[in-house]
Amino acid sequence: MSETRYKIVFDGALQPGVDITTAKLNLADLFKSDVAAIERLFSGRTVALKRELSHSDAQVYLQALGKTGIEARIEPETTVELNLADVHEQTPAPAEPDSPYAPPRADVGERLPEFAILKPFSVEGRIGRLRFLAWTMVLSLVTLPIIGIFAFIGLGLVSTDSTTGLIIGGIVAFFLFLAFGLVSILFSVQRLHDIGWSGWLWLLNLVPFVGSIFPLVMMAMPGNDGANRYGPPPPPNTTAVKVLCSLWIVFVGLIFAGAMVGGISAIQEEYESSLESSYESGSVTTDEIDAVAEPATISEDEAAEAAPPPVDSAKE
């Protein structure tokens, strides 16, 4: 008598508290398949995920499937006994409805879109590295002129000594800064989602020393190619995104050039001030400068005494 074989069947049931999208993503990762193919398993029909297994192998497969969040079960394979006396005519047998080679014809589970919908002012969604830099550049281009206008108004209020105006200007500037920081956090959270990380990791920016490195990590880490637990991938980068991202190169270049010019000017001013301070302190007097600039004059007698004695060439 042959050993009883088993199969693992699944009818779309999930474990308590497991979201269907999470289960699909886990199954896609387990079977190394895309989410669209996994959705065919959630048609409501009973399908056999694996056949012809021993009981121990079936237990191993069932344990691995249980970690994905689905409710699969083990069933024994139906044994077929053939009796040649009952065979009268060879007719094609109908295809077994739960065959693993015949996928369901209907998709019951929700179908994920190919690309995510962009939501700039939301904590949901994903954005790539270039779009993150482009959106940040737009935010900077909008915010800097507003800050400049309020700074100009504030200088005018200071000159007129308007206390009420200064208070109102300070309150408006505070709320503008708060709005700028909030939108910047939303962009960062979506960038973290694209990498597959939790948005709460943004709080690492507040940690000393780590906060100076973590933004660079966010911009350098590539995003997930396919869908992850935060949704489908972002749409491809447009020309506008690439142009706005390239403006960061110009912006950083201007800052570097300005820093170089400022540093050279500071060094030159420091050198000139040190020379002026040395003149004022008397370390180099005018008499010493004249003595170095003009050679000393001597008389003819002093020159004759200083000259070497004549040499008798005949004697030599």
Image (cartoon, rainbow, N blue to C red):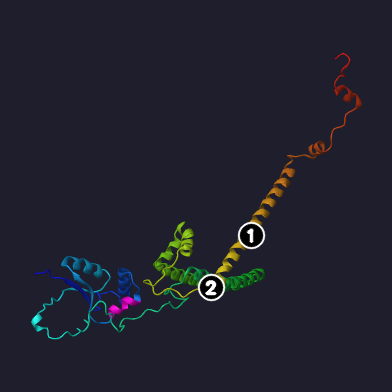
Q: Amino acid at mark 2?
A: Val
Quadrant location of the N terminus in the rendered image: bottom left
Q: Residue furthest top?
A: 315
Quadrant location of the C terminus in the rendered image: top right
For residue 167, say whether it is visible: no
Q: Is residue 202 magenta?
A: no
In this picture, residue 145 sits left or right of residue 196: right
* Secondary structure character of the magenta stretch overall: helix
Residue 272 lies, in percent from the top left, at 72, 49
Q: Is residue 41 magenta?
A: yes
Viewer-proximal residue among 294 and 187: 187
Q: Is residue 151 above or below residue 264?
A: below
From the image, tell me which residue sits under label 2.
241
Q: Residue at x 48, y 68 (%)?
A: 129
In the image, the segment drawn in magenta is 36-42
From the image, tell me which residue sits under label 1.
257
